[in-house]
Amino acid sequence: MTHQVIKSLHSPHVERVKALLGSRGKKIRREESLFIADGVQSIRSALMPKIASAPLIEKIYLTESGEAKLRSEFSDQIVDAHEIIPVTDEVMAAMADTQAPQGILTLCRFKELSLTQILAAAPKRIAFFWQIQDPGNAGTAIRTADACGFDAILFSEGSVDIYSPKVVRSTAGSLWHIPVAQELTLSEVSELSVSDQYSVVAFDGTGDRTLEELPSDRPTIAVFGNEARGLPTLPDSIEKIRIPMSGFAESLNVASAAAIALYHLGNPENR
């Protein structure tokens, strides 16, 4: 379905998008289960999702140039299956969260996943991030877990909202490729460490064993801590693992540590 071109900066569509992207956006996103994805990378993945639980497209806002980009990559049948709302360049600039919008904004609906729903699919590799605060780190973590073949990624309570514009942008479309759950407690994950189902390991510089010494034959949950505070007190059933470093740096940024660990754990040769 295609509407008439929106030319007014006071359109209800503009106000709705700005509300989802604004300072009170987190509350509104949670209440309405909606978020905004901007740009070509996101809509590529949104139009061709890889998982059943992927966010769904509600509306696509397009400038004339944005529509040309979209139709150059996808058939009219795929594009026209969604509600298309044409907007002027001025309206897009007013709605977008970026300084140089690409002429494409997508209103998407998400479904919050529980740990039970994640585990129902019998995932073999899961990443859990405890109270990660930086949107770029969170988005990079999702993108890295996707690239390394992980089956799911979890975020604890107190973490950044994964549907905030900066996180969504940083995922580069991976929200439509890998199941993501948020607002989980450490105790929920810790309970799995005393079962025979998963090996739960936390990455910390004080660990006795190194990443290379991890057994590869068990389903694994990899735990990463907060950017500034690291990990909280963990039960004895969660083993601390360190990444060996041959240089002089004392530690790694959480996104860098995760990239190394997730690549190693996700590599089929290490399984």
Image (cartoon, grey):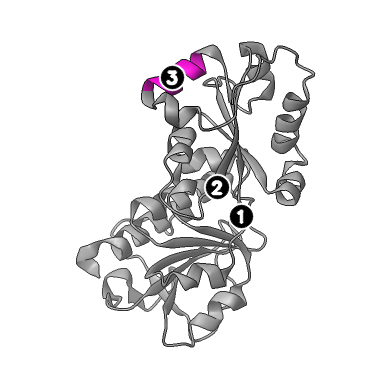
Of pointers 3 and 2, the one earlier in the residue sequence: 2
Q: What amino acid type is highlighted by mark number 1?
A: Lys
Of pointers 1 and 3, the one earlier in the residue sequence: 3
Classed neighbour count for the residue bearing mark 3: other residues with Cα under 10 Å, few (<14), some (14–19), many (≥20): some
Magenta residues? 65-72
Q: Is residue 228 above or below residue 194?
A: above
Q: Position of residue 47 (x, y in %)?
A: 46, 37
Which numbered tag is attached to residue 55?
2
The residue singled out by tag 1 in the image is: 111
- Tag 2 and tag 1, C-beta contact below 8 Å: yes
Q: Position of residue 152 (x, y in %)?
A: 45, 62
Classed neighbour count for the residue bearing mark 2: other residues with Cα under 10 Å, few (<14), some (14–19), many (≥20): many
Of pointers 2 and 1, the one earlier in the residue sequence: 2
- Viewer-proximal residue among 151 and 235: 151
Q: What amino acid type is highlighted by mark number 3?
A: Lys
Q: Is residue 82 above or below residue 241?
A: above
Q: What amino acid type is highlighted by mark number 2?
A: Pro
